[in-house]
Image (tube, grey):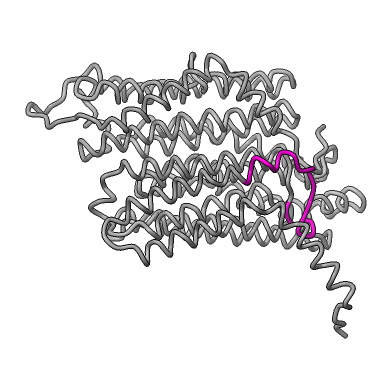
Amino acid sequence: MFELPSGAEIQAIIASLNASVGYFLPEIYLSVLFMLLIVIDLMAKGRKNNLLSITALAGLAGSFFFIVPQHSMPAGEFFFGMYVLDEFALFFKYFFVVSGMLTVIITMADEQFDSEVRSMGEYYALVVAMVIGMIMMASSNDLLMIFLSMELVSFSAYILTGYFKRNLQSSEAALKYLVYGAVSSGLMVYGFSLIYGMTAQTNLIRISAELAAHGYDPLVMILATLLIIAGFGYKIGAVPFHFWSPDVYEGAPTPITALLSVASKAAGFALLVRYYFVSVPHGLQPYEDIVGIDWHSLLIVIAAASMIYGNVVALWQKNVKRLLAYSSIAHAGYILLGIIVMDKLGTQATLFYLLAYFLMNFGAFYVVILIANKTGSENLDDYRGLGKSMPLAGAALTVFLISLVGLPPTAGFIGKLMIFAAMLNKGSLYIVLALIGILTSVISLYYYMLIPLNMFLRESPQSGEKSMELSMPARLIMVALMAVTIYFGLYFAPLSDFAKYSSALYGMTMH
């Protein structure tokens, strides 16, 4: 028979919630910003899109006021163990807020919104909702919270992907994204249910303790592992869960493509790292007596397949956004290499690579938007001769592409160097993986350099070209992103130190 909690128990619950709220202030602030944007959209008249853009940008920047003081708070669990605050979570709070700000900035530069969308209120509100969900993904310490935060991100992303309602390609991308997302979420939840059935726990730390103390059925664990990896793999866009990526990246509004390829992917990696290091009991090989696989082996196969497939298929792409989509599949493989290393150096390399990828990918998509504004095209052949008419854009895009390849003197070079250095300390299998990474990076050099080749070494087929002059704000943003990409390739200590500081997870025991 169900018993109601006593007065003392209710008071204890209320006291616990009150204590937890102090750790949740950035998320509460962003939730208020979400509602404020909707109210402004409903109340404001006239040219309200500029007001919405500035409010969203300033509002996201204002969240730092609540995030910075959290560095002085002790790491630990709150909200009954469902949520956690640690250096790792703080890293991603900064990452996702800045991602949201850059998305707003490049949205303001995208002229396609002027012709496709009347009001931007729901758009900016959904971007903020997505930022909240991604922050929650990085801080989730419980299977229920993981699922809820992933769904908040996913539902926001589905709507944003199809935000150009009259554009058939955008609508098709949203539908494909929704179908793949629903299937992967269902698979992941079923995997979670198996884990709960074995441990009677949803908290990641307690799941690890239960599995280590009482053991588990290997066949059930294999099935649960495969199902959970399907959910996480879809979020990071790794092979064989990548099928949605090319169509969604090509069809979605370009600022949303940038947000999905950088921030949403990073949120998936944050979740994977926390789940993999906190709940999976390392040191145990539960499946060797049956099929000889474990989480580690699966991630090795996924990483190698992603690097090879993403880079090889990108060779045939003619649409620049689709090319960058396949390149993002390959980069998911490179980032997985840092996780596979399973030590603090590997986690530090993963976080640094995410920072470098953030700079170069957002930069590349920003230039793609500026070029599309002037040419009306994202086709590779239409980039011919643009180096003469848009020299600054051509130079910036070349820098970002060099960084994506992983060549000096860019942040991308340091990112790959740190990943490969972390692997070379670990033995022969890791050396093979590092070699695959290096060889596939050489393949990527070909398709990335096709873009500058067209821009600078081929003549434009059009004789009478319209004005290709860029606005001063667009030039400044482009130069700033290009300069930062090169600066952190030459002087990478601040980013490296920040990644090292952020590589500590609450409840994690590195092996």
Residue 300, given in percent of the width and then of the height, sits at 65, 34
Coordinates of residue 294 in the picture (x, y in percent): 75, 42
Q: Judge whether residue 415 is colored magenta.
A: no
Residue at the far right: name it. Answer: 213
Residue that sits furthest to the bottom in the current view: 1
Which of 236 and 112 lies nearest the eye of the viewer? 112
List x then y, in percent, for residue 244.
Answer: 45, 49
Task: Specify the quadrant that holds the C terminus.
Answer: top right
Q: Which of 425 and 359 is in front in this view?
A: 359
Residue 69: within the magenta? yes
Residue at 53% x, 31% y: name it. Answer: 307
- The answer to which quarter of the image holds residue 172 is bottom left
Q: Which residue is drawn at 89% across and 78% down?
A: 6
Q: Residue at x 41, y 47 (%)?
A: 256
- Please provide the residue range marked out in magenta: 66-83
Residue under the point 74% across and 22% down: 426
The answer to whether 249 is drawn above or below residue 48 in the figure is above
* Quadrant occupied by the N terminus: bottom right
Residue 54 to residue 468: above or below: below
